[in-house]
Amino acid sequence: MLPELSIACCLLAVTVMVHAAGLSAVLRRLSRSPISLDSFLRVTSLLVGVAWVLLVLHLVEIGLWALFYWWQGCLPDLESSLYFSGVTYTTLGYGDVLLSSDWRLLAPLEGLTGIMMSGLSVSFFFVVVSRAVAPKRGPTFDA
């Protein structure tokens, strides 16, 4: 049980590092380029762009967990590993694919990690929107 929890803690740390690196890159990009939000199209493209980056970050993180499951032989193939990881990370939890009893403690920890990273993404999205519509100051994205 202890080795599995240690591995889960390492996977959590890597997931947070990936997310932090992605959010930092977006913040750097937003702070370097002036954003004019005087039209619907510009506002929409900003929000769609941020949403895509966040989605890609989550897919990379799901992929990291899936690669671990596949590498350790927890699931029979990469497709099952990706499916299980996606269902677990997003907390859908269909239950049609399960980890072996040796590794089953990783599933709730991946779910909690997914909840935290999703919350962080929602918070980040809220900050982008808040800064973009800040009255009279204009958008500022200083990190």
Image (cartoon, helix red, strand yellow):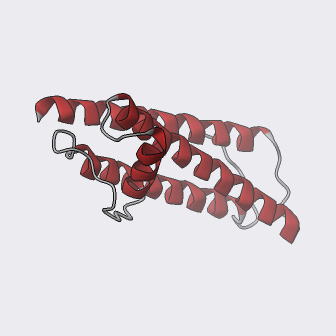
Residue extending farthest to the front is 76
The C terminus is located in which quarter?
top right
The residue under the point 85% across, 57% down is 36
The residue under the point 54% across, 40% down is 60
Q: Is residue 30 above or below residue 1?
A: below
User: Foreground: 81 or 36?
Assistant: 81
Q: Is residue 38 visible?
A: no
Where is residue 127 shown, x and y percent of the image?
58, 57
Q: Is residue 135 visible?
A: yes
Where is residue 41 shown, x and y percent of the image?
87, 66
Residue extending farthest to the left is 1
Where is residue 121 shown, x and y percent of the image?
52, 54
The residue under the point 39% across, 51% down is 84
* Left or right of residue 39: residue 45: left
**Which of the 4 quarters of the picture holds residue 7?**
top left
Where is residue 135 shown, x and y percent of the image?
72, 67
Q: Is residue 86 above or below residue 63?
A: below
The residue under the point 31% across, 53% down is 112
